Image (spheres, grey):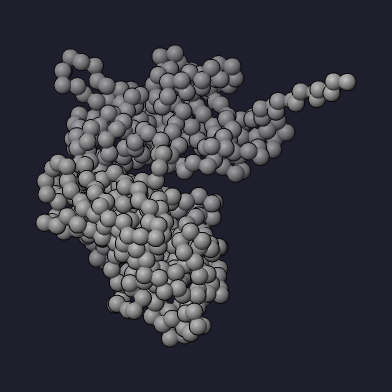
Amino acid sequence: MVFPVNISNNMSAAVTSLLRPITSDADGRFELTSLRPGAYTVSASSPGFVLSEQDSKAFYRPGDTVTLTLVKGGVITGRVTDSSGNPVVGAAVRAVKVRDTDDKPPRARGGILSQITESLEAFLGPYKTDDRGIYRIYGLSPGYYQVAAGGRGGQGFSLGGANAYDGDAPTYYPSSTLDTAAEVSVPAGEEATNIDIRYRENRGHSVGGTVSVSAGPTLPAISVLLTRANSGIVEATTVVLAGRNRFGFDSLLDGEYLVTAMGSSGNLTSSEGLTASVSQPRRITVRGADVSGVDLVLEPLGSIAGRAMIETLQDPKQKAECKDVRTSPVEGTVLSARDERKQTSVDPMRDSLSGLKNATPNEKGEFLIGMLRPGVQRVDVQLPGEHLYLKRITLTQPDPNAKPIDVAKNGVQLKSGEKLKGLVVSLSEGAAGLRGKVVTGDDKVPDVRIRVHLVPVEPEAADDVLRYFESEARNDGSFSFSNLTPGKYWLLTREISEQEKAEDAADHKPVAWDAGGRTGLRFEGEASKKIIDLSQCQRVTDFVIRYIPLASPSKPPAKKPIQ
C-alpha cells in the first residue's frame, strides 16, 4: 500500500491504494508508476508476517527504490477454561502490547497509512476460542503483551457476532484483573505456548458522561476513547452521533483511566482541510463502583498555512561544484509541527493526531499543517533530497514594514482554533553531508551512548537555530548528518544522560531550541577547537571523532574516627 501524505492534493491515489493495493511477484518485486510528485508512506503486509522497521523510512518520493522486509510474526496460544476446568467456547481473546523489546512503551509508526492499517488489522480477527477453549493469536510484532479473554475486544461493540461473554469484564492471563495481569514475552517469529487463562465471570463497572463543543460548527460524530492512564493503551471506544451528547462504557475492570473525545467536520479536499476539536483528557478512577458525570468539552484545534520555496544555485562556480545535484520538486517536502512543551502526561490522541499533522506543499508550494493544539509549536521540515538545506522559517507580520518573525528560533504561539497564515519556509540547494565514527583514545567504540553536535563557528550564526545539528551515534559508533548548511562548525560529543535514555525519541528537545543550550554548546566548541569547514555540496566520509570520557570524581579520603 502506497499512501500520499497530502491526501487533499492527491485523493485519487489515496482511494486507489486502499481499494486496489499492489501485489508483489514471486520474487517480492513491485513497481508503482505515474505517481504525482510528493511524499508517500509505503507499507507491506502478508498474513502471519510483520513489517520490520529497521530498514524502513517514514516517507518515500517518486524515483526512490524501496526495500521492505517482512519477518515472521510471533504467536501466543493457550486455552481458556472456567472455574470448573471446562472449556470457554467462543470468547474473544486479544493480545495487548504493553512494551516494545527495548522496554519502552509501544508507539504507532508515523503516517496516516500505518494508522489505517492498524485499524483494519483490528477487524482481521477476532481471535476466539474454539470448541476446546483453545485460541491462537498470530502475526504479532516482538514485544511484551498482556492477554485478555472476554468482553468486546476494546472496540465498544462485538466483533464477529455477539456471544455470551461480550458483557463481561475481561479476564487477563493467568486469571487476573488489570492491575495484576502477567506479561507474555514474544520474541521475533517465536511462539509463546500454554498461556492458559482461568476465566472469571466479572460484570465489571460502567463509565458515562456527556460531550459538548465549546466553539465551531456542529460535529457529525464524536469519538470517545477510554485509555489506560499510565500508558495510553486503548481499552474501549465509542461514537456519539450528532444530536446526542451522552456516552457510556461498560464491563470495565477497576483501574485508572483517561477519557478523551475528538470530532471533525469539513473534508480533506477543501482548502481549509478538516476542522477538528479535541477535549482535554479526564482522569477517572474505577474502584468497586460505576463512574458517572464525566463531562468532556471539545476545543477546536488550530492550523498553520504557508508557502515553501526552493532557492536554486545561480552562481556558475557553485553550479559547477554541484553538477551532480538532482532537482527535487518542492512537493516532496514534509512539514509538521510539534508542541514545544515536554510531554508530562499520557496524551491518548497523540498518535492519532501525529499522522494527520504531516503536510506536503502543492505544486505552488502552498501547504496547510492542521490538527494542532494550542501552545508554542515548532515547525519540523523533512527535505526531499540530500542536496537541499533549510535556510529560513519565518512568519510574515501584518505590518509590511515589520521584520518577519524567526519561527525557527522562537516557534509559533498558537491559540485554540487559530488558523495562522503567512509561514514561509525557504530551502536552498547546495547542502553538505558528513559521515564518520566516534571512537575512544584507543580506537574503540565508546561503551556509552553518544550524541554528536555540530555548532556554527561564525558569530553571526550564534542564534541561527537552523545552523545547529545533532545526531545520535549508532551502536558501532557511526554517525551521519545530511542537509547541512555550508559553513564552519565545531564538532562536539556528549554522553546521553539517563533521563534522555528513558524518554521517547519523539519527546527529545534539541539543545539549540534553548538560548542557554546554544550558549553552552558554543562554550564547549570554543574549548574543543575541533573545527570542520563544509563547502557547497561537499560530502565528507570516514571522519573520526575522538571521544574523551568525563573523569569520574574521586572519592574524598575517609575521615578518621575521633579518638
**Residue at image location 34% in from the left, 36% down from the top:** 339
Q: Which residue is found at the position 20% from the left and 29% from the top?
A: 422
What is the x, y in percent for residue 458?
Answer: 45, 15
> Is 438 displayed left or right of 183 in the figure?
right
Q: Nearer the viewer, residue 305 or 178?
A: 178
Position of 375 relative to 48 (above/below) = above
- Is any part of residue 257 visible from this angle? yes
Residue drawn at x 29%, y 44% is: 280
Q: Residue at x 20, y 41 (%)?
A: 300
Where is residue 268 shown, x and y percent of the image?
18, 50
Residue furthest to the front in view is 289
Quarter assignment of residue 126? bottom left
Tell me if I can see residue 122 in this picture: no
* 502 vs 193: above or below: above
The quarter of the rendered structure image containing the C terminus is: top right
Q: Give residue 474's position: percent from left, percent from top.
A: 56, 42
Horizontal side, residue 271 vs residue 68: left or right: left
Q: Position of residue 108 (x, y in %)?
A: 39, 53
Q: Quadrant of the N terminus?
A: bottom left
Front residue (pair 496, 408): 496
Residue 410 location, quadrant? top left
